[in-house]
Amino acid sequence: QGQLVESGGGPVKSGGSLRLSCAASGFDFSDSYMTWVRQAPGKGLEWVSYMSSTGIYTNYADSVKGRFTISRDNAKMTLYLQMNSLRADDTAFYYCARADSSTGMLDHWGRGSLVTVSS
Amino acid sequence: SYELTQPPSVSVSPGQTARITCSGDTLPKQYTYWYQQKPGQTPLLLIYKDTKRPSGIPERMSASTSGTTVTLTISGVQVEDEADYYCQSADSTSAYWVFGGGTKLTVL
């Protein structure tokens, strides 16, 4: 059974940076699109970014474009999200999820890592 | 930016049928996925590729499409179905992924 474990969250000042990691196990990571989804406390899900299995294709939500960078290390089965110029409205739980390559479904989710940005 | 529209809330009594809609211009051209999220838990995939159910999801969870609207139907609603439900799809032009705003299902 696949598992995803996020780490790297925590408190940070507005304008600061954080790097989230997501360690994968139990599935073919190198054949999977991976994505970051966030959820502000008490709010809905918001897609943040995705990266193709080889890393060639990436995409970002307008709200984070130019500030966040997604990357992956297939040898380490780890997904990353570098977050720069953080703002208060970036405060959220950040989930990594796997997108099945044939169906596109997000079938594995991590438990999330909380990022709290204070001014 | 592309948006998917869901009703904020739906209420039903146990045993009734709940229907949650999701509307978006490109839904006829892009697959829709549905997720259930209970308080304090991570999202759970309910439906993929518009109408398909992953293994382990009960048959009373189903979905249908009609033009720019997709509908998640929960038959014989149980108290345990009380949760937030999100649709998800993609924008054909930008390839952005997008979630609907979520619908809180209350089982009275």
Image: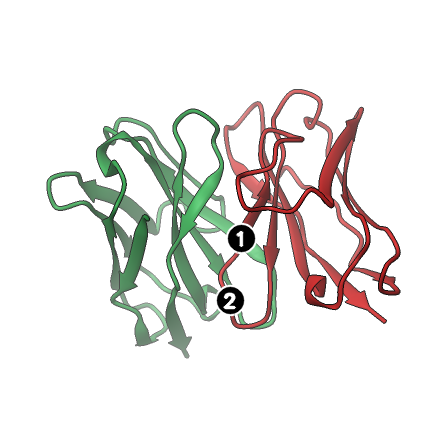
Q: Is residue A69 left or right of residue A42?
A: left
Q: Are marks 1 and 2 in contact (CB under 8 Å)?
A: yes
| Mark 1 Cα-neighbour bin, 10 Å: few <14, some 14–19, many ≥20 | some
Residue A83 visible in the current orientation: no
Q: Secondary structure at mark 1?
A: strand
Callout 2: SS: loop
| In this view, A46 is above or below A62 | below
Residue with the mark numbered 2: B41
Chain letter matching colour red: B
Please tell me in which quadrant of the rendered image residue A54 appears.
top left
Residue A93 position within the rendered picture, expressed as x and y whole percent measured from the top left: 44, 66
The C terminus of chain B - image quarter: bottom right
Residue at 27% x, 41% y is A27
Quadrant location, the N terminus of chain B: top right
**Residue appearing at x 52%, y 38% in the figure:** B97
Question: Could you tell me if residue A52 is visible in this image?
Answer: yes
Q: Is residue A60 above or below residue B80?
A: above
Q: CA distance from mark 1 to mark 2?
A: 9 Å
Chain A as rendered: colour: green
| Residue type, mark 2 in image | Gln
Q: Chain of mark 2?
A: B
